[in-house]
Image (spheres, rainbow, N blue to C red):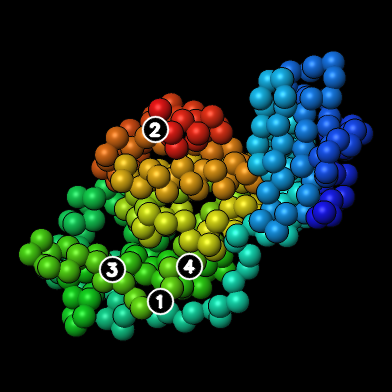
Amino acid sequence: MKKQNILLKSLVEQSLGTGKPTSGNNVAFYCPKCNHKNMKLEVDFTDHPNGVNPYSCWVCKFKGRTVAALLKAVGAPLSDIEKARSYVKYSGFEASEEQQQEVELPPEFIPLSDENIKKDWIWEKSMRYLASRGVTKGDIYKYNIGYCRAKKYRNMVIFPLYDEKGTLIYFVARSFDDKSWVKYRNPKASKNIVPNEHLINWNVPVVLVEGVFDMLAVRRNALPLLGKTIQKAVMRKLLNSPAGKIYIALDKDAQDEAYEYSEMLLDQGKEVYLVDMKRKDPSDLGFEAFTELIQQTLPVDYDGLLQHKLGI
């Protein structure tokens, strides 16, 4: 029989009191949700290689898949929840051994915040395009947005992206020429990064969006995924950060992925909100409409995830 993870058991007993061994590596506790007079909440403390330790109450059906989620649900200290994540063998998002990639902005890159640049027609079109997408002058300074007049990135606005230390790790180039057949031109570099981490406060709710224009529309603590996939670097950061609430604002065509990510985050004790975008992007809605939508969004639970899987 596989061994019991005694570290996880000790953490749970700190919150729920001493448990009673049942079958295998299961231990029963008094359920904090229904407060049944008998120990009806069972937790599987088997040291599983996939990091899953399911728990379930036989009376009220309070259940989940990891000890971190259980501790979160019963109001345990954040330090205990973080310990629970570290006590499992595998979360699926272990640290990558990839070397730090080197990315450089195009040699032709010109910051739009530079007051000394020649304001030619390309500068004017860049500014008009950004304004049409809701980008403010404050955004241009904050995100070091620029443009290119010549060569490969001609007639494109450039959005540099930085790591937690402010080092360039990627950039997004978007054409402002309606007749261009290339809308985006990005560097040949890995997207397994945490874009603009230097601007993220991990102590407050984090909003996951798809693109840089969505990031600008949300304004507050928004992290662009550069697509519909939560990269391992981002997921690892979310799981290991103190951020308790995660808002996922992806397109309708990425809802299956969004529910999958929600389950991963719920398993690790995070509070997850799936924002119903109603076939619009945050950049389409704008700051005020998106803020109103996010305030109406309720947290996801395991029952909701199951209903989605069953198509109910």
C-alpha span from label 2 to label 3: 38 Å
Give me the disc on residue 311.
Answer: 2
The location of residue 190, given as percent across then percent down, is: 43, 73
**Mark 2 or mark 4, whichever is nearer to me:** 2
**Mark 3 or mark 4, whichever is nearer to me:** 4
Q: Are the two marked residues, 2 and 3, in contact with CB atoms closer than 8 angstroms?
A: no
Q: Earlier in the sequence, mark 2 or mark 4?
A: 4
Identify the residue under disc 1: 189
Q: Earlier in the sequence, mark 3 or mark 4?
A: 3
Element marked by disc 3: strand
Identify the residue under disc 3: 173
Element marked by disc 1: loop
Identify the residue under disc 4: 192
Q: Which is nearer the eye, 183 or 20?
A: 20
C-alpha span from label 1 to label 2: 38 Å
Q: Earlier in the sequence, mark 1 or mark 2?
A: 1
Q: In which quarter of the view is residue 155 placed? A: bottom left
Q: Is residue 292 left or right of residue 28?
A: left
C-alpha span from label 3 to label 4: 18 Å
